[in-house]
Image (spheres, rainbow, N blue to C red):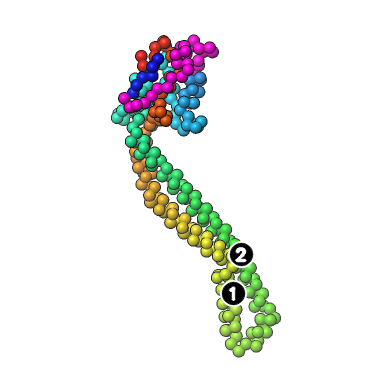
Amino acid sequence: CQPPTDPLGLTTVLTSMTEANMCKHHTPPMEDADFVKQCEAFCAINGRQLGLPLVMGTTTFGFGFQDMRDLCVGGTEDNDVMRYNESEIAFCRSRSGALSSIETEAAAFVGAVEVFKAEQVALRAKMQARVNELQTELRSAEFQGEMDRAVDKMSVLRGKFQEFREESAGSGSSATEFKAAIDQVKDSGESLKRVMDASLLQFSEFLANCNQMYLGVGTQSEFLVDICSQANAACVDA
């Protein structure tokens, strides 16, 4: 049995059982479940089922090559079950990652926001501790004595608050990390916007043009595997 030729260069794979005997005469006899397993193995990509393996026939009946090809390859009819069009497949493949790109950038943005929230809590805790320290200082006997001796008491009090403001907002690792978290949120947000601007159009094109079932082929353009003969001993293209 010689695998049939195809005008699009698609190839048919023959198994070791193809010409050995009819399906029902194998030992043990082939069953429908065996067809499913071999079909799934043939269609798997690196051991993973990423497509839809389609078993055509059973242990008691099968189809000729042209009938199976017409079902798999299709044409231009709207009612085609599947289609094989390399340019359309390439177009859809190039746009299939659009949503994934948005999800990746969105996850990065959410992560940056979570870091910002954590730094915000840390800074708030530090500032609350500094407020408690300030209140303690203002009630201290040392500060009360300083105020008693001061001619411009408001200037002394204002200076103490100014010192508190500078220490709380302008120095320390918490303030630095908080500012870094703000910058990261800003950068992540801008990156997400850029990706969305570029990817939403591609995703819309994917939804509008890639809602078909396309035929998947192997590295050697193989699309069909002939496991064994059902009704007679004729080759698959007979």
Q: Quadrant of residue 225?
A: top left
Q: Looking at this view, is 132 or 28 the one in front?
A: 28
* Residue position marked by numbered label 2 in the rendering: 125
Residue 126 is left or right of residue 48, and the answer is right
Question: How far across and how far down the image is residue 165, in percent?
Answer: 56, 73
Across and down, in percent, residue 89 comes to: 36, 35
Question: Quarter-wise, where is residue 99 in the image?
Answer: top left
Q: Residue furthest right?
A: 141
Quadrant, the C terminus:
top left
User: Sequence-wise, which precedes: disc 2 or disc 1?
Assistant: 2
Distance between the Cα atoms at labels 2 and 1?
Answer: 15 Å
Q: Which residue is mark 1?
A: 164
Query: Relative to 216, is 190 above or below?
Result: below
Q: Look at the numbered disc 2 and give the secondary structure of its residue.
A: helix
Residue type for callout 2: Ala
Q: Main secondary structure of the magenta part?
A: loop
Q: Residue furthest left?
A: 76
For label 1, the SS is: helix
Instruction: State the residue at coordinates (58%, 80%).
Output: 159
Is residue 189 one of those drawn in magenta? Answer: no
Which x, y percent locates residue 222?
40, 26
Label 2 environment density (alpha carbons within 10 Å; few <14, some 14–19, many ≥20): few
Asked if the residue at tag 1 contacts the one at tag 2, i.e. Cβ–Cβ closer than 8 Å, the answer is no
Q: Is residue 23 magenta?
A: yes
Give, as a single range, the part of the protein colored magenta.
7-32
Q: Is residue 227 left or right of residue 159?
A: left
Specify whether residue 207 is in view. Answer: no
Q: Residues within 10 Å of mark 1 (few under 14, many from 20)?
A: some
